[in-house]
Image: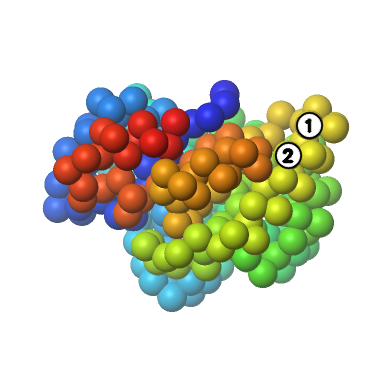
Amino acid sequence: MKHLIAPSLLAADKTKLQDEIDLVQNLGAEWLHWDVMDGIFVPNKSYTVDDVKKYSKTHKMFNDVHIMVADPKYWAPLFVQAGADSVTFHIEAVEYCPKCTNKIIDALHAANCKAGISIKPCSSVNDIAPFLSKLDLVLVMSVEPGKGGQKFMPEALEKIAQLRKIIDENNYHCLIEVDGGINGETGALCRQAGADVLVAGSYLFGHDDIVRRIESLR
């Protein structure tokens, strides 16, 4: 799978969520991105296990669940049960602990779920490089996680390029996903740097020209 678009429901209208999901599916989005926040690891709260469980089977897109939580070991299996096709947790949430990280990755794979790791802007590619051979996905945050509508941080492009080089040189089967401030312009830069999956929320939802905007990300 290459060059995928993952609309982020963080920017969707929560009062008509099914309509928003149907809209992006009908416009050809391949993935659906769920941002989960616990109010601890990041200040805000967003979608829950119950939300994913309620809507994960109402469409045919890939349920891409990004858990911004303080205890990913506890929460990851619950989202698998709720219908997640992939669960991405933060390396910072396990305090860069290799043993803890490997346990979560192995548990996700044992449950037939794709495993991903995300890095905040403060973390480096070196922090996750030892796990790339086992991962299905690495998520580069190009904003500080916790809320939508932030401006893209261009230093993320270097991380994407570094990851692309490592993954290609070692023939790893790990997709590179980017989230934060993605629009037609920044999305193109991320593609050029080597990204496979673009997450976009406020750029897509709430606009009359969403068809054009999705096409601009392709």
Which mark, by number, is residue 23? none
Asked whether residue 177 is in view, the answer is: no
Tell me if label 2 and label 1 are in contact, CB under 8 Å. yes
Q: Is residue 23 above or below residue 91?
A: above
Q: Which residue is mark 2?
A: 164
Quarter that holds the C terminus: top left
Asked whether residue 217 is in view, the answer is: yes
Quarter that holds the N terminus: top right
Crowding near pointer 1: few (<14 within 10 Å), some, many (20+)? few
Q: Which residue is mark 1?
A: 168
Q: Amino acid at mark 1?
A: Asp
Q: Left or right: 172 with respect to 191?
A: right
Q: Residue shown at 75%/55% (left/top)?
A: 125
Q: Left or right: 70 with respect to 60?
A: right
Q: Quadrant of residue 72?
A: bottom right
Q: Residue furthest left?
A: 15
